[in-house]
Amino acid sequence: MSIASLLHVLFAVIWVGGMFFAWMILRPVAVTTLEPPERLMLWRRVLAKFFVWVWKAAILVPLSGYWLAFAMSGSMAHWPTHIHVMHGLGLIMVILFLVAFFLPFRHLRRAVDGRDWQAGGKALGRIRQLVGINLIIGIIVVVVASGGRFGLLG
């Protein structure tokens, strides 16, 4: 169980922390210091590297979460409320990541590689929206996980 807990927390931190860094630090700096072509090339490379880690997180966080939940509470019917909330929100996060990866990120790669800056900007805007939603959900999951452990959520 300690390995499952370590993997769960570590990859959740990598995922949510990476989104926080991208949204709150990298994006504002890139917007104020880089012209659109350079900014799009930066994001194409940054997201390609970050999404490798998100793929790992999108697999390991749910698997380790199931391992922990079933080991601690048995069937889903016996899971505490906070585990159900984390489970549902976590699945939504995975779905939003898959949408971002397979749709706008694919368009961003194609646009940047073809130097179509307008299409690249639109694709990056869609990724930004999806990452923003996922960041909010991820922060809610952190709050639920922290509060639920101490019985604050029922």
Image (cartoon, grey):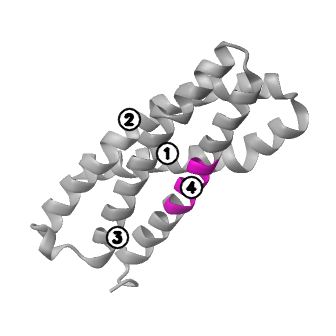
The nearer-to-camera label among 1 and 3 is 3
| Residue occupying image coordinates x 69% and y 28% | 120
Residue receiving disc 3: 85
| Residue occupying image coordinates x 45% and y 41% | 99
Viewer-nearest residue: 35 or 64 = 35
Kind of residue sitting beneath label 3: Val
What segment is highlighted magenta in the picture?
129-137
Viewer-nearest residue: 63 or 150 = 63
Viewer-nearest residue: 72 or 57 = 57
The nearer-to-camera label among 4 and 1 is 4
Splitting the image into 4 quarters, where does residue 118 fall?
Answer: top right
Which disc number belongs to residue 135?
Answer: 4
Q: CA distance from mark 2 to mark 4?
A: 17 Å
Q: CA distance from mark 3 to mark 2?
A: 21 Å
Kind of residue sitting beneath label 1: Trp
Residue 145, image x and y in percent? 40, 68
Residue receiving disc 1: 15
The residue tagged with tag 3: helix, strand or loop? helix
